[in-house]
Image (cartoon, rainbow, N blue to C red):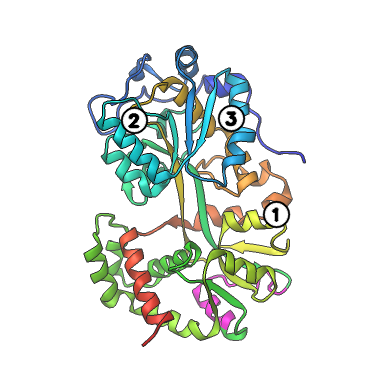
Amino acid sequence: MRRVFLVLALSVVLSGAAAASGQAAEPVGAADFNVRSSVDLRALTPANFAERLVPAARVAAPIVFYDFTESFTPLFTQQVIPRFERVTGLHVQYRQVNGEQAVQQLIAARRAGQAAPVDVFFIPNGQVRLAVESGIVANLPLNTMLPSAPDLEQNAATVARGFRHGGVVVPFHRNQTAIGYDSRFVTSAQAPRDFAGLLAYAQANPGAVAITNPARGGSGQGLLETAIVSMTPPDCQARLFDYTVDAAAAEAWADGPCLAPVLAYFRELRPLVEFTNGNTDTLTLMGNGVVHVGSVWEDQTYDFLGRGLLPPTIRMRLLTEGQVGDGDGIMIPSGTRNLAGALLLVDFLLSNEVQLLKLEMNGSRSARTGLDIDRALRPEIVARLIPAEQYTTLSGPRITGTISSAATRRFVADILQPR
């Protein structure tokens, strides 16, 4: 099968665009860099990136790459790493790890005064705060120093689950909650376009809508978070993106009046829809034609379509109120043994070639705003995704996790298990 992506020439992958503008790298949140380097990092720019890094990388140890996922393993081992090694002549040792355990391993190594066991880490966003505050992340401005990624969306490039890290973790994978529908039964014009439309469709078609239980799957929790952003009164909104809110304050917020309009909406919706026990359960009902509309993750739906687990008539859209999304990033440990090689690999991971290949293989969105997805990928690939104009205008960040968890707890008690 022909892969469609932008193949970067060696000079672009390694050197960056000679015309690329950009200031020399400066440490993030400190006066000095917290990572050792044989290269003068303050003199490193997008224009001289490869010239200064390649020689240093070739005399250092192999690059060790940690991947906390399983779904990206074929992308990395069969496509990305072989291409990088072929282009650069550098060797990468790939290891699939548990994300939380790997963070603890890095913390232990730092406390023991030892070098990090890894040079590039694909890290879960939920672990970024701990990793940065523990000092195990190199304070490099990855969001501005990489030649291959001059167009990163600012929030995705500097914030992880509400924690403002300032650019030391570069966004690699972006995922998005959405509304899925089966075009055999629901035309694009009939598909719910907003929360009022979702309720109206459920009223006209009882039992034809599936929503994932927010306590059992992220697509349902994402829909609940979207409703919270859309329906709560203005004076309640400030706490939603205040990521310093602790669990006790979040519980107080959720038990107060702020959730009243959200709960009222779902009380009306509850008898008309099927609440499922997980993201896969929702897609299974859609695949079997039992329901025609459901809460979904874009990347999981894309994957199921590609594997024939869903009929090709399944489509996705975002509600006009906007829907929340998330993602995970790449960081370089402060104790890396091969900083030069790590920077080259991270730059390659953010390149057009890899970002488009990742989208085609995994349905994984990019934080690169300059990529023209509709032109770069085949029409049948684009058809499996949320329309580009909706993704770019209606995707938003998830609310603070403490409030989301507290709201989910109240939702289950009041809507799914009413007294």
Q: CA distance from mark 1 to mark 2?
A: 38 Å
- Please tell me the numbered disc located at residue 288: none
177 vs 31, left or right, is: right
Q: Residue at x 44, y 41 (%)?
A: 329
Q: Amino acid at mark 2?
A: Ala
Q: Could you say whether the residue bearing mark 1 is in a helix, strand or loop?
A: loop
Residue designated by label 2? 138
Magenta-colored span:
185-202
Residue 374 against residue 229 in the figure, above or below: above
Residue 81: mark:
3
Residue highlighted by disc 1: 307
Q: Amino acid at mark 1?
A: Arg
**Residue at 64% from the left image edge and 35% from the top image edge:** 78
Residue 191 lies within the magenta run: yes
Q: Nearer the viewer, mark 1 or mark 2?
A: 1
At mark 2, the secondary structure is loop
Q: Residues within 10 Å of mark 2 (few under 14, many from 20)?
A: many
341 vs 137: above or below: above
Type of residue at label 3? Ile
Q: CA distance from mark 3 to mark 2?
A: 22 Å
Among the two numbered marks 3 and 2 on one chain, the one whose residue lies closer to the N terminus? 3
In space, the residues marked 1 and 3 are separated at their CA atoms by 24 Å
**Figure quadrant of the C terminus:** bottom left
Q: Secondary structure at mark 3?
A: helix
**Is residue 151 in view from this perspective?**
no
Q: Is residue 267 magenta?
A: no
**Residue 6, quarter of picture:** top right
Residue drawn at x 70%, y 73% as measured from the top left: 289
